[in-house]
Image (spheres, helix red, strand yellow):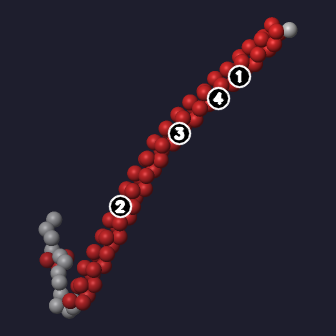
């Protein structure tokens, strides 16, 4: 598989410096745009990861608060029973 001299890329004298500069500028611009998109995507992935960790932590807090609410409700019920018993003793 030899490479033919005709198939290689060459710079022709008919290509002006303006065209060459425009091509280099276009390639550099495209590279900059893609690196910018990559940086933005990395940032979004990082923020999403942090949000998912915060969501998991918030879910744990919600479960703990629900358990505390259940305990408070049970304590209020016991206190109501104690009040009823004390009222019955006083009569």
Identify the mark at residue 76; answer none if there is no mark.
1
Seen in the image, is 24 located left or right of residue 48?
left
For marks 1 and 3, give the one nearer the viewer: 1
Seen in the image, is 27 located left or right of residue 71?
left
Residue 51: where, in percent of width, then height? 47, 47
Identify the mark at residue 69; answer none if there is no mark.
4
Say which quarter of the image contains residue 8: bottom left
Say whether marks 4 and 2 touch (CB < 8 Å).
no
The secondary element bearing badge 1 is classed as: helix
Q: Earlier in the sequence, mark 1 or mark 3?
A: 3
Quarter of the image where the C terminus is located: top right
Point out the residue furthest to the front here. Answer: 90
Q: Earlier in the sequence, mark 4 or mark 3?
A: 3
Q: Earlier in the sequence, mark 4 or mark 1?
A: 4
Say whether marks 4 and 1 touch (CB < 8 Å).
no
Residue 22: where, in percent of width, then height? 28, 84
* Whole-number angstrom distance, CA of label 2 to CA of label 3: 28 Å
Q: Crowding at label 1, few (<14), some or many (≥20) Cα neighbours within 10 Å?
A: few
Residue picked out by circle 2: 39
């Amino acid at each position: 598989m030899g490479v033919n001299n005709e198939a290689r890329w060459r710079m022709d004298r008919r290509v002006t410096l303006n065209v060459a500069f425009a091509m280099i500028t276009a390639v550099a611009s495209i590279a900059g745009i893609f690196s910018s998109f990559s940086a933005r995507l990395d940032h979004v992935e990082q923020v999403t990861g942090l949000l998912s960790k915060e969501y998991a932590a918030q879910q744990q807090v919600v479960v703990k608060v629900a358990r505390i609410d259940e305990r408070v409700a049970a304590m209020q019920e016991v206190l109501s029973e104690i009040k009823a018993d004390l009222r019955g003793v006083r009569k």
